[in-house]
Amino acid sequence: SLIFMDQPPNAETAPCHPDATPEDRAKAGYNALARLAAGRVDAFVAVAEWLKAQGLSAPSILAHDAAQGLAVLEDLGDDLFAVLIAGGLDETALYDAAIEGLVKLHSVVPPAALTAPGISWPLLDYDEVALKTAGDILPEWLPRLKPELSFSAAAVADWDKLWAPIRARGAAGASVFCHRDYHAENLIWLPDRQGAARVGLLDFQDAVRAHPAWDMSMLLHDARRDVSPQREASALAYYFKLRPELDQAQFMADYHALGALNIVRILGIFARLVTRDGKPRYAAFMPRLWGYLDTCLADPEMADLKTWFDANVPAASRR
C-alpha cells in the first residue's frame, strides 16, 4: 500500500533560512528559532532520499510535488517498536538494530544540503539559538501547568547561565546527522531486511546536524515508554562496542548534559500541549521524564543544575 502526504508549504511559520541571523529567526517565529522544517514536504523528501542512500529504511518516494506540498510514499507497515514491545516481543533485537542505525548515521559526515529531484534542503546545525529555544520552553510553560511554581527573575537568569555551557557543548559537537525524533513510536520493525535497514524510519523531516548524544537521548529517554536502566546500559555498551574510537567518559558526560537539555525541552513542550493546546494526555508522560532527568542530574558534572531544580521545582511538582 501507499501513503499520500498532503502538507501545504505555508501551513506553518517559515523554516530557518541558512543565512538568517538570530534576530531574523526571532522575527520569523518558532520554527526558525528551533530550526524545525515547518512540515515542509521538500524537507521530508530530501531527508528520505539521503537516508536511503545510506542504506537505511526511509520510505521510498514514488512521486512528489513539493511546491504543492504533496508526495506519495511507500507504506512501511504498522509494526512500530513501541507496539511490538508492548505486545511482548523481546526488545533486545529492536534496540540493537536502532543502535546500529545510529552508528551508521554517526559514521558519515553529512552534507550541508540534502537533495532530491528538484529539491535542495539545508541540513542546519542544532546551534545555540535552537538549543536555547528548546530549553527555555520549560521555565515559560511549566508554571502554567503547575501553579504552585513561580520562577523569579533571578532563578530564570540562573537557568540561562547554567545551561549556557551545555548549549555551547551541543553546538560545538554538532557533527552528525540527527533524526531528532528517534524513539520507539517512530521506528518500524522490518525483520526481513538486514542490519540497520531493519529499522523503518518515520518523522525525520526536522533533521539537523547535531551532537551524536542527541538522538541517543531521544531513543533512551523515551517519553512514551519506560526504558529500563538495564536497557539503557546495554544499548550504550553496544554503541561503544561498534564505535571503539570514542572517548566513552566524554560521551557519557555529553549524554547526561545534552540528555538533560533534551528532557527539559520535552517537559516544556508537554506542559505547553496540556495548557495551551488542551491535550491533557501528555501530562501522564511527565513523571517518566522527571525520572530520566533525575538520572542525568546525578552526574557530578550536573550538580549545579541539580541544585537549581531542587530549589525551584520541589519533588512534589515533578509528577
Image (cartoon, grey):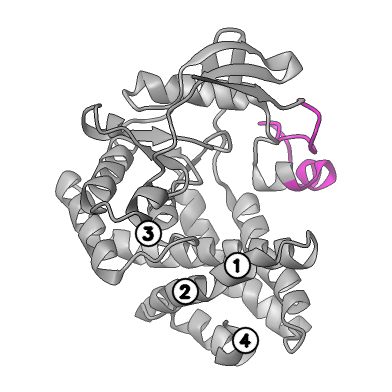
Q: Label 3 to label 4, Cα distance in Å?
A: 23 Å
Q: Which residue type carries mark 2?
A: Leu
Going from N to C along the chain, the mark reached first, 1 or 4, is 1
The residue tagged 4 is: 317
| Mark 3 secondary-structure assignment | helix
- Occupied quadrant, residue 234: bottom left
> Considering only vertical position in the picture, is 296 above or below 245?
below
- Residue behind mark 2: 293
The earlier-in-sequence mark between 2 and 1 is 1
Q: Residue furthest right?
A: 27
Q: State yes or no: discs 2 and 1 in contact (Cβ < 8 Å).
A: yes
Amino acid carrying mark 1 in the image: Leu
Give the distance between the C-alpha atoms of the residues marked 1 and 4, in whole angstroms: 12 Å
10 Å crowding of disc 2: few (<14), some (14-19), many (20+): many
Element type at mark 4: helix
**Image disc number at residue 220:** 3
- Circle 1 — which element? helix
Camera-side residue of 245 and 150: 150
Magenta stretch bounds: 9-30
